[in-house]
Image (spheres, rainbow, N blue to C red):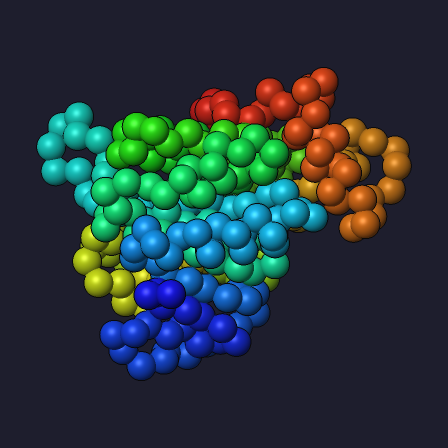
Amino acid sequence: MNCGTFEDGFYTNSSRKSAKFSSLSKPISQLLVIHEADDVIEAVEQIYQRSSSYPVIGLDCEWTPCHRKKQKPDVALLQIATQDGYCVLFRTCFMKEVPSPLLKLLADRRIVKVGVGIFHDGLFLKDKFPQMRVNSRLDLRHLSRYCKIHSKRESLAALTHALLPFELQKKNVLSYKWEKDLSDEMVLYAALDALAAVLIFDKLLPLFHEKISEEPFHETTQLNLIEKYFLEAGSPFVQFLDTKVKSS
């Protein structure tokens, strides 16, 4: 693969030496940065394999700044993470077309895509690639409100602070140019946004279950609960999918 990789605390990019990140309580098991469409197939196969028993992936996008009024964001990076810490950064700024395996993954209604503001991420991706459909999008704010997770802000960083053992660093994000070479800091920032999303869902799922069921939560039943609440047509919570979050 012509892409950077991150394993056991190291991110390796072919253009520079390995760089170790501190605070590895952030559970990244592997991180790939993909520049070319040819490298997409293997990464998507891994995502499918790793999400077979936990059909939820974190999804986020980064885009180039808008300099004109009514200009739509141009998605430069698509980040996807599985619950076991497998993170892939697709550099969409270098892709004229999206390979069919990635289109299939994003359109697959049997895999829930979670994030904050994910409804609009799907729209921005469709603006860039008209053939792309992102189905089964679940904004985490639907669940956090249902579970009464109180926070002054409902951002991904705020939910991470409330529910996870690490923080998302946002102080330099406005200076990032996602269509240019990615620094190690940018790579880690982007990966953690997607990973935090799926880990927040993992924390909210038992709280959500306890709100609506008298049955105890067991990790062995996670797959059944995900399917029951978010994938079965008769579930009242399917209404959360592919819908915007109203302002609180």
Q: Is residue 81 left or right of residue 1?
A: right
What is the quadrant of residue 2 in the picture?
bottom left
Q: Residue furthest left?
A: 68
The residue depicted at 28 percent of the width and 40 percent of the height is 97
Q: Is residue 214 above or below residue 189?
A: above
Q: Is residue 216 left or right of residue 233?
A: right
Q: Is residue 27 left or right of residue 175?
A: right
What is the quadrant of residue 89 in the picture?
bottom left
Work out whether residue 159 can be spotted: no
x then y, percent, for residue 241 = 55, 26
Q: Residue furthest right?
A: 215
The front one of 211 and 10 is 10
x then y, percent, for residue 130 = 30, 28
The residue depicted at 23 percent of the width and 42 percent of the height is 96
x then y, percent, for residue 137 = 51, 32
The front one of 89 and 26 is 89
The residue depicted at 48 percent of the width and 50 percent of the height is 44
x then y, percent, for residue 198 = 56, 48
Q: Is residue 71 above or below residue 84?
A: above
Work out whether residue 95 can be spotted: yes
The residue depicted at 52 percent of the width and 76 percent of the height is 8
Name the quadrant of the N terminus. Answer: bottom left
Figure label count: 0
